[in-house]
């Protein structure tokens, strides 16, 4: 499982000219799954995400979590996080989990995060247009 965590001033997802998810002041997540990913790994990474201290405190130091600042999350499924280009310029996605299983894990991931914080989403497998303003910029890759 891979999650790209990006601190966002704002973020939104549009599918077929309709906004499916939108946040202000929070985290934009790109989430990908591979074979062997489990609920235990989802639980671990969700706790890691909500406790990441990447928001500034009163002294301007990254010392607050998303919970501390009252932020929200925009979660976007992203199988291309498992692209492999070792054999050429055309990416292979053999390491990405099949869509049936990945959909289940993505739903579990969002349900787990929702226990702690408001989560907006895109639509799994859809052609999504994502717009966001990265703050910092702060971008962190989490992998389990």
Image (tube, rainbow, N blue to C red):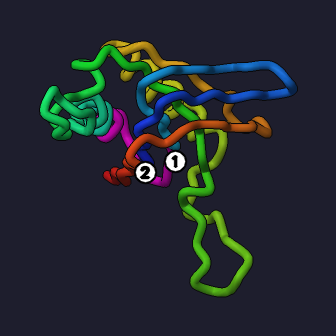
Q: Position of residue 70 (x, y in %)?
A: 32, 14
Q: Residues within 10 Å of mark 2 (few under 14, many from 20)?
A: many
Please give the label number shown on residue 32: 1
Q: Position of residue 85 (x, y in %)?
A: 61, 78
Residue lying furthest front: 59
Q: 55 above or below 119? A: below
> Taking 1 as reference, is 33 left or right?
right
> Taking 47 as reference, is 106 left or right?
right
Q: How many marks?
A: 2
Which residue is at 74% across, 38% downward? 129
Which residue is at 17% across, 29% downward? 57
> Taking 58 as reference, is 82 left or right?
right
Q: 116 above or below 58? A: above
Which residue is at 37% across, 21% downward? 112
Badge 2 is on which residue? 2
Q: 123 above or below 90? A: above
- Which residues are the magenta region? 31-42
Residues at marks 2 and 1 touching, judged by CB atoms closer than 8 Å: yes
Front residue (pair 102, 91): 91
Q: Which quarter of the picture shows residue 44?
A: top left
Q: Which quarter of the picture shows residue 83?
A: bottom right
> Taking 32 as reference, is 25 left or right?
left
Please give the label number shown on residue 85: none
Residue 38 painted magenta: yes
Which residue is at 43% across, 29% downward? 109
């Amino acid at each position: 499982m891979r999650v790209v965590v990006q601190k966002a001033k704002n973020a939104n997802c549009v599918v077929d000219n309709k906004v499916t998810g939108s946040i202000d002041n929070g985290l934009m997540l790109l989430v990908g799954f591979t074979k062997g990913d489990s609920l235990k790994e989802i639980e671990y990474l969700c706790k890691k995400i909500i406790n990441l201290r990447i928001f500034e405190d009163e002294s301007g130091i990254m010392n607050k979590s998303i919970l501390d600042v009252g932020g929200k999350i925009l979660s976007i499924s992203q199988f291309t996080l498992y692209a492999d280009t070792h054999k050429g310029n055309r990416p292979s996605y053999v390491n990405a989990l099949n869509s049936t299983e990945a959909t289940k894990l993505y739903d579990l991931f969002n349900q787990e995060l929702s226990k702690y914080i408001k989560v907006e989403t895109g639509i799994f497998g859809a052609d999504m247009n994502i717009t966001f303003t990265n703050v910092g910029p702060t971008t962190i890759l989490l992998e389990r």
